[in-house]
Amino acid sequence: MSQNFAFLDEHSKKEIRRKTLKAIVIPGYQVPFASRELPIARGWGTGGLQLTLSLVGQEDVLKVIDQGSDESVNAVNIRNLIQSTTGVEETIHSGEATLIQSRHRIPEVPLKPFQILVLQVPQPEPLRVVEASERKTKMLHGDKEYSGAFIKLFEQIMKYGHITDDADYPVMVNDRYVMAPSPIPRFDNPKMNHNDGLILLGAGREKKIHAVPPYTKVESLAFEDYPFEVEQFDDKVCRESGLTGVYMDELQDEETGETYYMTNDTSYMLEKMNEGAVNNAKQ
């Protein structure tokens, strides 16, 4: 028995592509789709994987990352599934890939016009924390009634003195729909605004696709007296590469107990370290 190219049957891929086109035409809008069964657990990236499998072509160059790493178990298994059913070329370099699937991060290297970034999304509904009914959330989106999303942020300010959402921070897309940008850190939210590449977001368990087309306005929700702020790493230095101003992981040395920082996007860190080694060799 022969295996379908990119695992999914052609009818499934066609249906997902049609829903993807609709999501691109209506930025930020959640488009329902018939989520297929895949050999990975729901919640571990089936939505993003279905988008990738429906879009990947023989000429594509693939990159898969999970929370900034190309070598995590999730990233390796998803990459192996895609590569084994398509034979496409793969890379760890963000700038070389035409199709990037990611969980919880937007790469540090800015997307280019020919690139597609696919983000895995566990919960695509930004209003779910304030409204359990799917029917009512659809009505709220239709009426552009997003006071519930602002109330959630306001309650955090009243309780803690500041907004505490560090990931999956809601955004307004194209001045119309409030969108959940997947559990990317809020550090990555500004990267979506007027971005050169196409960003697709898939939620397999919730059966939703939404999108941020190139050059689309994306603005994080905030208040005039409590503006949106990203995590600051300007005063932190990556112990391995010496980089600053990038998203970093706070780690602890098991031997000394010392707290140190390391660049989260491992391929970006390696590229910068290699560039430094080449420059030093030339000198």
Image (cartoon, helix red, strand yellow):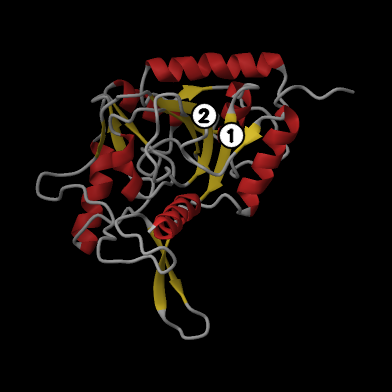
Residue 196 point in image, percent of width and height: 35, 28
- Residue 78 shows in the view: yes
Residue 244 point in image, percent of width and height: 31, 60
CA gap, disc 2 to disc 1?
6 Å
Horizontal arrangement in the rendering, residue 99 relative to residue 35 (left or right): left
Give the residue at x 21% y 50%: 154
Q: Quadrant of the N terminus?
A: top right
Q: How many marks on residues?
A: 2
Residue 265 point in image, percent of width and height: 45, 52
Q: Quadrant of the C terminus?
A: bottom left
Which image quarter: residue 168? top left
Give the residue at x 58% y 31%: 61
Q: Give 208 or 79, whichever is nearer the viewer.
A: 79
Q: Is residue 87 above or below residue 185?
A: above
| Residue linked to disc 2 | 98
Residue 251 point in image, percent of width and height: 45, 71
Which image quarter: residue 5? top right
Check whether the beta carbons of the residues at disc 2 and disc 1 lie within 8 A of each other.
yes
Which badge, 2 or 1, comes first in the chain's sequence? 1
Which image quarter: residue 86? top right
Give the residue at x 70% y 31%: 37
| Residue type, label 2 | Thr
Q: Is residue 234 above or below residue 210?
A: below
**Secondary structure under the numbered disc 1 in the rendered image:** strand
Q: Is residue 251 above or below residue 189?
A: below
| Residue linked to disc 1 | 62
Outermost residue toward the bottom in this view: 256
Task: Please rate how many residues cluster around mark 1, counting C-alpha atoms within 10 Å: few if below 14, some from 14 to 19, many from 20.
Answer: many
